[in-house]
Amino acid sequence: MDNKTLSERDICTKFITPAIQQAGWQQSEFREVVRLTDVGIMVRGKLVAPIRDIDAKGSPKRADYVLYARPNMPIEVIEAKQARFSIGHGMQQALVYAEMLNAPFALSCNGGGFPLHDRIGFSRPIERELKLDQFPQLAALWRLYQEWRGFAGPCLRSLPITACRTPKTSRYWNSRPSTSSTVRHKSRVASSATLNNTPRLYTSSNKYCTTSKSTKKPEQPFGPEDK
């Protein structure tokens, strides 16, 4: 089978989801096609129509994958692209969505691997390419996340976490989105902010696009180096 003939959804089904599950992530810890903003509308004279083209200005924003470390706590965003595009083609988009969700890690995938960018700069190198069987485990990302936030396990358990949990929905997200994208976005940020003040990220150039960088000293890397 020629991978370049596969659709973006095929890339998700055949490559990304299996890689996530092989790394030990549970179904309750990740979502696909996550709506970040509401559908925009286009007005021309007396005609009003929804904007459905994701590349058009004012179009709705949707992340292909969002992975969660704890309730209402996105830790990773993945943007899928067809194999005819370069492996890092979706990185800029993934970084935009990661910033919207305050998620520290962003990945792109075209079925051939995962370029991973550490927005908090707690691993070295900040950006690397992982093979499909090297998808980062939650424990590795969570360790870096806790260090970035400045808390450990016992401290975390004592902090208030606003979880959108109901008997019929997963404990990791609210399955009934708000009618307002602004409210939805602010609620995510507020939930994350209850943990502690978010360290500010600094921008600089990197291999794929313009994004963040930290002045933190090099830490123990994760990914291929851990193999």
Image: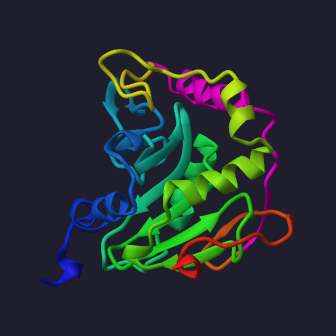
Vertically, is 152 above or below 218?
A: above
**The residue positioned farthest toward the front in the image shown:** 154
Q: Nearer the viewer, residue 157 or 179?
A: 157
**The residue positioned farthest toward the top in the image shown:** 167
In screen coordinates, is 195 left or right of 112? right
Q: Position of residue 47 (x, y in %)?
A: 31, 27
Span colored in magenta: 179-205
* Residue pictured at 53% horizontal, 80% vertical: 224
Vertically, is 120 above or below 88?
A: above
Q: How many marks?
A: 0
Q: Per the image, is 10 magenta?
A: no
Q: Position of residue 131 (x, y in %)?
A: 42, 79
* Residue pictured at 31% horizontal, 77% vertical: 83
* Residue pictured at 78% horizontal, 62% vertical: 203
* Residue 65 makes an appearance in the image: yes
What colour scheme does the image use?
rainbow
User: Where on the picture, by quarter, is residue 175?
Assistant: top left
User: Where on the picture, by quarter, is residue 52?
Assistant: top left
Q: Quadrant of the N terminus?
A: bottom left
Q: Position of residue 198 (x, y in %)?
A: 78, 40
**The residue positioned farthest toward the bottom in the image shown:** 2
Q: Position of residue 150 (x, y in %)?
A: 80, 44
* Residue pictured at 22% horizontal, 60% vertical: 13
Q: Per the image, is 181 magenta?
A: yes
